[in-house]
Image: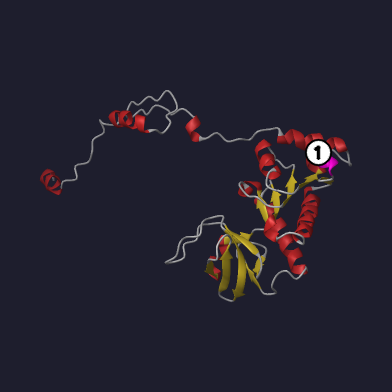
Amino acid sequence: MAHYLHRGQLYFHDTRDDAGEAAVRRWHTLTQRHDVREVALIADSSNQEIDRLNARAQNLRAQHGELGHTEIQLPHQHYGLRQGDLIAFTTQHRPPGHPCVENGTRGEINAIDERGVTITLDGSDRTIRLADERLDSLRLAYAQHVYRQQGATVERSVIVTSGWQTSKETAYVEASRARDGTEWYLARDQLGADGQDERLVRQPAGMMRQSRAQTPSLAHRELADPDYGLNFDRVIAPSRSRLPGLARALGHIARPDRSPERSIGRD
Protein backbone atom coordinates (compact mmCIF):
# COMPACT_ATOMS: atom_id res chain seq x y z
CA MET A 1 0.00 0.00 0.00
CA ALA A 2 2.90 2.36 0.69
CA HIS A 3 4.20 1.54 -2.78
CA TYR A 4 0.88 2.48 -4.39
CA LEU A 5 0.72 5.66 -2.30
CA HIS A 6 4.24 6.62 -3.42
CA ARG A 7 3.30 6.05 -7.06
CA GLY A 8 0.13 8.15 -6.77
CA GLN A 9 -2.19 5.17 -7.25
CA LEU A 10 -3.81 5.19 -3.79
CA TYR A 11 -6.57 7.75 -3.18
CA PHE A 12 -8.39 8.65 0.05
CA HIS A 13 -11.89 10.18 -0.01
CA ASP A 14 -14.12 11.31 2.82
CA THR A 15 -16.89 8.73 2.34
CA ARG A 16 -17.45 5.44 0.56
CA ASP A 17 -19.82 7.16 -1.87
CA ASP A 18 -17.15 9.75 -2.68
CA ALA A 19 -14.61 6.99 -3.25
CA GLY A 20 -17.02 5.13 -5.52
CA GLU A 21 -17.80 8.24 -7.57
CA ALA A 22 -14.11 9.04 -8.04
CA ALA A 23 -13.37 5.43 -8.97
CA VAL A 24 -16.11 5.19 -11.61
CA ARG A 25 -15.01 8.49 -13.15
CA ARG A 26 -11.43 7.25 -13.32
CA TRP A 27 -12.69 3.98 -14.81
CA HIS A 28 -14.47 5.88 -17.57
CA THR A 29 -11.40 7.99 -18.29
CA LEU A 30 -9.33 4.84 -18.71
CA THR A 31 -11.93 3.34 -21.08
CA GLN A 32 -11.19 6.20 -23.46
CA ARG A 33 -7.69 4.78 -23.90
CA HIS A 34 -8.44 1.06 -23.51
CA ASP A 35 -11.24 -1.22 -24.62
CA VAL A 36 -14.06 -1.06 -22.07
CA ARG A 37 -13.60 -4.79 -21.34
CA GLU A 38 -9.93 -4.19 -20.53
CA VAL A 39 -10.60 -1.88 -17.57
CA ALA A 40 -11.96 -3.62 -14.47
CA LEU A 41 -14.04 -1.71 -11.91
CA ILE A 42 -13.99 -3.83 -8.76
CA ALA A 43 -15.54 -3.40 -5.31
CA ASP A 44 -15.52 -5.62 -2.23
CA SER A 45 -18.74 -4.45 -0.63
CA SER A 46 -22.45 -5.15 -1.19
CA ASN A 47 -24.47 -5.92 -4.30
CA GLN A 48 -26.24 -2.59 -3.74
CA GLU A 49 -22.93 -0.79 -4.19
CA ILE A 50 -22.19 -2.80 -7.33
CA ASP A 51 -25.59 -1.75 -8.71
CA ARG A 52 -24.87 1.92 -7.96
CA LEU A 53 -21.45 1.77 -9.63
CA ASN A 54 -22.95 0.03 -12.67
CA ALA A 55 -25.69 2.62 -13.02
CA ARG A 56 -23.17 5.46 -12.73
CA ALA A 57 -20.85 3.85 -15.28
CA GLN A 58 -23.76 3.45 -17.69
CA ASN A 59 -24.74 7.08 -17.16
CA LEU A 60 -21.23 8.30 -18.02
CA ARG A 61 -21.14 6.17 -21.17
CA ALA A 62 -24.55 7.49 -22.21
CA GLN A 63 -23.46 11.10 -21.64
CA HIS A 64 -20.49 10.54 -23.97
CA GLY A 65 -22.63 9.02 -26.72
CA GLU A 66 -21.29 5.49 -26.28
CA LEU A 67 -24.73 3.86 -25.92
CA GLY A 68 -27.96 3.79 -27.90
CA HIS A 69 -30.87 6.09 -27.06
CA THR A 70 -33.55 3.41 -26.65
CA GLU A 71 -33.77 1.94 -23.16
CA ILE A 72 -35.63 -1.10 -21.88
CA GLN A 73 -36.25 -1.22 -18.14
CA LEU A 74 -35.02 -4.12 -16.05
CA PRO A 75 -37.83 -5.34 -13.76
CA HIS A 76 -35.57 -5.90 -10.75
CA GLN A 77 -33.21 -2.90 -11.03
CA HIS A 78 -33.41 0.88 -10.89
CA TYR A 79 -31.68 1.09 -14.29
CA GLY A 80 -32.48 -0.16 -17.78
CA LEU A 81 -30.43 -1.49 -20.68
CA ARG A 82 -29.28 0.25 -23.84
CA GLN A 83 -27.64 -0.88 -27.04
CA GLY A 84 -23.91 -1.17 -26.37
CA ASP A 85 -24.29 -1.99 -22.65
CA LEU A 86 -22.14 -4.76 -21.21
CA ILE A 87 -24.23 -7.26 -19.27
CA ALA A 88 -23.86 -10.44 -17.20
CA PHE A 89 -26.29 -13.29 -16.61
CA THR A 90 -27.21 -13.80 -12.96
CA THR A 91 -28.93 -17.15 -13.52
CA GLN A 92 -28.56 -20.03 -15.94
CA HIS A 93 -30.51 -19.49 -19.16
CA ARG A 94 -31.73 -22.45 -21.24
CA PRO A 95 -32.89 -21.40 -24.71
CA PRO A 96 -34.95 -24.20 -26.30
CA GLY A 97 -32.90 -26.31 -28.68
CA HIS A 98 -29.63 -24.52 -27.92
CA PRO A 99 -26.80 -24.89 -25.38
CA CYS A 100 -27.50 -23.26 -22.03
CA VAL A 101 -25.94 -19.96 -21.04
CA GLU A 102 -24.23 -20.34 -17.68
CA ASN A 103 -24.64 -18.03 -14.71
CA GLY A 104 -21.96 -15.34 -14.89
CA THR A 105 -21.69 -15.34 -18.69
CA ARG A 106 -21.08 -11.85 -20.06
CA GLY A 107 -22.05 -10.20 -23.30
CA GLU A 108 -23.10 -7.02 -25.07
CA ILE A 109 -26.55 -5.70 -25.95
CA ASN A 110 -26.70 -5.50 -29.75
CA ALA A 111 -30.32 -4.54 -30.28
CA ILE A 112 -33.43 -3.54 -28.30
CA ASP A 113 -37.08 -3.55 -29.27
CA GLU A 114 -40.42 -3.69 -27.48
CA ARG A 115 -40.22 -7.48 -27.16
CA GLY A 116 -36.74 -7.87 -25.66
CA VAL A 117 -33.03 -7.69 -26.41
CA THR A 118 -30.42 -9.35 -28.62
CA ILE A 119 -27.11 -10.24 -26.95
CA THR A 120 -23.74 -11.28 -28.35
CA LEU A 121 -21.92 -13.42 -25.79
CA ASP A 122 -18.30 -12.62 -24.96
CA GLY A 123 -15.71 -15.07 -26.19
CA SER A 124 -17.82 -16.31 -29.10
CA ASP A 125 -19.91 -15.11 -32.02
CA ARG A 126 -23.02 -16.62 -30.49
CA THR A 127 -26.05 -14.36 -30.48
CA ILE A 128 -29.14 -15.05 -28.41
CA ARG A 129 -32.54 -13.43 -28.11
CA LEU A 130 -33.96 -12.72 -24.67
CA ALA A 131 -37.64 -11.84 -24.32
CA ASP A 132 -38.64 -9.05 -21.98
CA GLU A 133 -40.10 -11.48 -19.43
CA ARG A 134 -36.63 -13.01 -19.01
CA LEU A 135 -34.77 -9.76 -18.43
CA ASP A 136 -34.63 -10.41 -14.68
CA SER A 137 -31.70 -12.73 -15.41
CA LEU A 138 -29.51 -9.80 -16.55
CA ARG A 139 -27.59 -6.99 -14.89
CA LEU A 140 -25.01 -4.46 -16.02
CA ALA A 141 -21.43 -5.74 -15.96
CA TYR A 142 -19.24 -2.64 -15.80
CA ALA A 143 -18.60 -3.00 -12.07
CA GLN A 144 -18.01 -6.43 -10.56
CA HIS A 145 -17.74 -7.81 -7.06
CA VAL A 146 -14.23 -9.00 -6.32
CA TYR A 147 -15.30 -12.66 -6.18
CA ARG A 148 -16.60 -12.52 -9.76
CA GLN A 149 -13.24 -11.17 -10.95
CA GLN A 150 -11.24 -14.22 -9.88
CA GLY A 151 -9.26 -15.49 -12.85
CA ALA A 152 -9.77 -12.35 -14.95
CA THR A 153 -6.87 -10.55 -16.63
CA VAL A 154 -7.22 -6.97 -17.89
CA GLU A 155 -5.03 -4.00 -18.76
CA ARG A 156 -6.06 -1.72 -15.87
CA SER A 157 -7.98 -2.12 -12.61
CA VAL A 158 -9.79 0.44 -10.49
CA ILE A 159 -10.55 -0.81 -6.98
CA VAL A 160 -13.00 0.45 -4.34
CA THR A 161 -11.97 -1.16 -1.07
CA SER A 162 -11.46 -0.79 2.72
CA GLY A 163 -14.94 -2.11 3.50
CA TRP A 164 -15.90 -4.82 5.98
CA GLN A 165 -15.19 -7.54 3.40
CA THR A 166 -11.59 -6.45 2.82
CA SER A 167 -9.19 -9.31 3.53
CA LYS A 168 -5.96 -10.97 2.45
CA GLU A 169 -7.83 -13.03 -0.13
CA THR A 170 -9.83 -10.18 -1.69
CA ALA A 171 -6.76 -7.92 -1.78
CA TYR A 172 -4.80 -10.58 -3.64
CA VAL A 173 -7.51 -10.86 -6.30
CA GLU A 174 -7.79 -7.08 -6.61
CA ALA A 175 -4.05 -6.50 -6.88
CA SER A 176 -3.37 -9.23 -9.43
CA ARG A 177 -5.96 -8.61 -12.18
CA ALA A 178 -4.19 -5.91 -14.23
CA ARG A 179 -1.16 -6.14 -16.50
CA ASP A 180 -0.45 -2.43 -16.58
CA GLY A 181 -1.62 -0.81 -13.36
CA THR A 182 -3.98 -0.92 -10.39
CA GLU A 183 -5.49 2.09 -8.64
CA TRP A 184 -7.10 2.00 -5.20
CA TYR A 185 -9.94 4.20 -3.86
CA LEU A 186 -10.58 4.20 -0.12
CA ALA A 187 -12.92 6.00 2.29
CA ARG A 188 -11.56 7.75 5.36
CA ASP A 189 -14.81 7.22 7.25
CA GLN A 190 -14.18 3.46 7.09
CA LEU A 191 -10.64 3.78 8.42
CA GLY A 192 -11.43 5.38 11.75
CA ALA A 193 -9.65 8.69 11.19
CA ASP A 194 -10.29 12.11 9.67
CA GLY A 195 -8.18 14.26 7.42
CA GLN A 196 -5.57 13.50 4.77
CA ASP A 197 -3.00 11.54 6.73
CA GLU A 198 -0.53 9.29 4.93
CA ARG A 199 -0.42 7.07 8.01
CA LEU A 200 -3.93 6.00 7.09
CA VAL A 201 -2.27 3.59 4.70
CA ARG A 202 -1.63 1.36 7.74
CA GLN A 203 -5.37 0.85 8.22
CA PRO A 204 -6.17 -0.81 4.87
CA ALA A 205 -2.89 -2.69 5.08
CA GLY A 206 -4.03 -4.10 8.42
CA MET A 207 -7.35 -5.19 6.91
CA MET A 208 -5.49 -6.88 4.07
CA ARG A 209 -3.43 -8.94 6.50
CA GLN A 210 -6.54 -10.60 7.91
CA SER A 211 -7.48 -13.87 6.29
CA ARG A 212 -11.13 -14.74 5.63
CA ALA A 213 -10.32 -17.98 3.83
CA GLN A 214 -13.14 -20.50 3.93
CA THR A 215 -12.40 -24.08 4.90
CA PRO A 216 -13.42 -26.74 2.36
CA SER A 217 -15.75 -29.44 3.61
CA LEU A 218 -13.15 -32.18 3.07
CA ALA A 219 -10.97 -30.56 5.72
CA HIS A 220 -13.52 -31.43 8.43
CA ARG A 221 -13.90 -34.79 10.17
CA GLU A 222 -17.00 -36.77 9.35
CA LEU A 223 -19.26 -37.56 12.29
CA ALA A 224 -20.25 -41.09 13.23
CA ASP A 225 -23.58 -42.19 11.76
CA PRO A 226 -25.76 -43.52 14.61
CA ASP A 227 -27.97 -45.53 12.22
CA TYR A 228 -25.20 -47.61 10.73
CA GLY A 229 -22.52 -47.47 13.38
CA LEU A 230 -19.91 -46.01 11.05
CA ASN A 231 -17.08 -44.22 12.78
CA PHE A 232 -14.84 -42.10 10.57
CA ASP A 233 -12.02 -40.81 12.76
CA ARG A 234 -10.17 -38.98 10.00
CA VAL A 235 -10.83 -37.07 6.82
CA ILE A 236 -11.72 -39.45 4.02
CA ALA A 237 -10.15 -38.29 0.77
CA PRO A 238 -11.89 -39.57 -2.36
CA SER A 239 -9.79 -42.36 -3.84
CA ARG A 240 -10.33 -45.71 -5.50
CA SER A 241 -8.61 -47.58 -2.67
CA ARG A 242 -11.29 -46.58 -0.14
CA LEU A 243 -14.30 -47.55 -2.22
CA PRO A 244 -14.21 -51.32 -1.40
CA GLY A 245 -13.99 -50.56 2.32
CA LEU A 246 -16.92 -48.19 2.08
CA ALA A 247 -18.94 -50.83 0.22
CA ARG A 248 -18.23 -53.38 2.97
CA ALA A 249 -19.24 -50.88 5.65
CA LEU A 250 -22.57 -50.31 3.96
CA GLY A 251 -23.10 -53.92 2.91
CA HIS A 252 -25.58 -54.70 5.66
CA ILE A 253 -28.08 -52.19 4.28
CA ALA A 254 -30.95 -54.16 2.73
CA ARG A 255 -31.40 -53.69 -0.98
CA PRO A 256 -34.95 -53.36 -2.32
CA ASP A 257 -36.26 -56.41 -4.16
CA ARG A 258 -37.20 -55.15 -7.62
CA SER A 259 -38.63 -58.45 -8.94
CA PRO A 260 -42.29 -57.83 -9.94
CA GLU A 261 -43.24 -61.48 -9.48
CA ARG A 262 -41.86 -61.74 -5.93
CA SER A 263 -43.42 -58.43 -5.00
CA ILE A 264 -46.83 -59.66 -6.12
CA GLY A 265 -46.38 -62.87 -4.14
CA ARG A 266 -45.62 -60.91 -0.97
CA ASP A 267 -48.71 -58.77 -1.39
Image location of residue 257, percent across then percent down: 19, 42
Q: Secondary structure at mark 1?
A: helix
Q: Nearer the viewer, residue 161 or 49?
A: 161
Image location of residue 18, percent across then percent down: 81, 51
Determine the residue located farthest toward the front in the rendered image. Answer: 179
Q: Provide the residue designation for mark 1.
A: 3
The residue sitting at 41% across, 34% down in the picture is 238
Task: Give the crowd class for mark 1: few <14, some 14-19, many >=20 residues within 10 Å.
Answer: few
Q: Quadrant of residue 198?
A: top right
Task: Answer whether residue 68 is magenta in the image.
Answer: no
**Taking 53 as reference, is 6 left or right?**
right
The residue sitting at 66% across, 52% down in the picture is 144
The residue sitting at 40% across, 25% down in the picture is 232
The residue sitting at 71% across, 43% down in the picture is 175
**Taking 10 as reference, is 75 left or right?**
left
Q: Nearer the viewer, residue 6 or 118?
A: 6
Determine the residue located farthest toward the left in the rendered image. Answer: 265
Question: Could one spot residue 165 in this view of the protein?
Answer: no
Main SS, magenta residues:
helix
Magenta-drawn segment? 1-7
Q: Quadrant of residue 206?
A: top right
Colouring rule applied to residues: secondary structure
Q: Amino acid at mark 1?
A: His
Q: How many marks?
A: 1
Q: Nearer the viewer, residue 73 or 158?
A: 158
Q: Quadrant of residue 26?
A: bottom right
